[in-house]
Image (cartoon, rainbow, N blue to C red):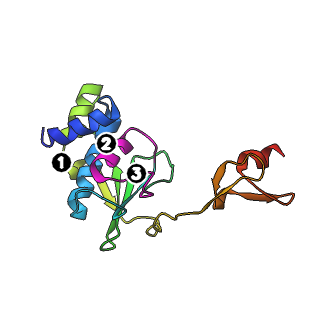
Amino acid sequence: MQNADLWQKCLDFHGHSCGGLAIGFRAALYARKLLGIDFSEDEQIVCVSENNACGVDAISVLLGCSIGKGNLLFRIRGKQAFSFYNRQNGQSFRLILKAQPDGVKDKASKLEYMLNAPDEDLFSITEVPLTMPLEAPIFESKPCGECGEMTAECFLRYKNGKLLCADCYDKS
């Protein structure tokens, strides 16, 4: 298998080998090739995943897209589809997993197919349905007027003269 060292990095992070991880692994490798960039140290590459399944771990490992950096976003649609954006040059595309051939039935053959089939056999490429997401915003934190826990300002709600976190707002 090509890129065995990268597959191992994904396995180490994810914890086990599975078809879902292989989907994200191949999507990330294909995106790297199409974007002409290997890893997003900051927010250069953005991924919008239409699922919250195993493959997202491979995208995090190989592309540097993460929830914490704000360049891994979810638009859950139950599809094995990933939109990628390159902030440096504005390039974007969406990869959608194609149906596997009829002869690929059991788990072992599915995994083998996912790891070794040509990129074009695995994914369709289309335009992205959304404009490029904004860079991750940074919000000031303030204490909740009830529990005192520091809360990002955008999540505080005003009630009875106090700024409250969502939990305290729901209780009162």
How packed is label 3: few (under 14 Cα within 10 Å), some, or many (20 or more)? many
Indicate the secondary structure of the residue bearing disc 1: loop
Q: Which dot, 2 or 3, sits closer to the camera?
A: 3
| Mark 2, residue position | 23
- For the point 44% across and 47% down, which residue is it? 79
Indicate the secondary structure of the residue bearing disc 2: helix
**Against 55, is 92 above or below?**
below
Mark 3 is on which residue type?
A: Ser
- For the point 45% across and 67% down, which residue is it? 135
**Against 140, is 166 above or below?**
above
Q: Is residue 103 visible?
A: no
- Residue 118: image tag: 1
How packed is label 1: few (under 14 Cα within 10 Å), some, or many (20 or more)? few
**Side of 56 relative to 170 (left or right):** left
Image x and y of residue 30, in percent: 24, 54
User: Going from the N terminus, do you reach mark 2 or mark 1 first?
Assistant: 2
Q: Magenta includes 59?
A: yes
User: Going from the N terminus, do you reach mark 2 or mark 3 first?
Assistant: 2
| CA distance for labels 2 and 1 | 13 Å
| Mark 3, residue position | 66
Q: Who is closer to the viewer here, 10 or 25?
A: 10
Q: Is residue 46 visible?
A: yes
**Side of 7 relative to 98 (left or right):** left
Q: Residue furthest right?
A: 160
* Cβ–Cβ under 8 Å for marks 3 and 1: no
**Against 30, is 136 above or below?**
below
Q: Which dot, 2 or 1, sits closer to the camera?
A: 2
Mark 2 is on which residue type?
A: Ile
Q: Which residues are magenta?
A: 51-71
* Cβ–Cβ under 8 Å for marks 2 and 3: no
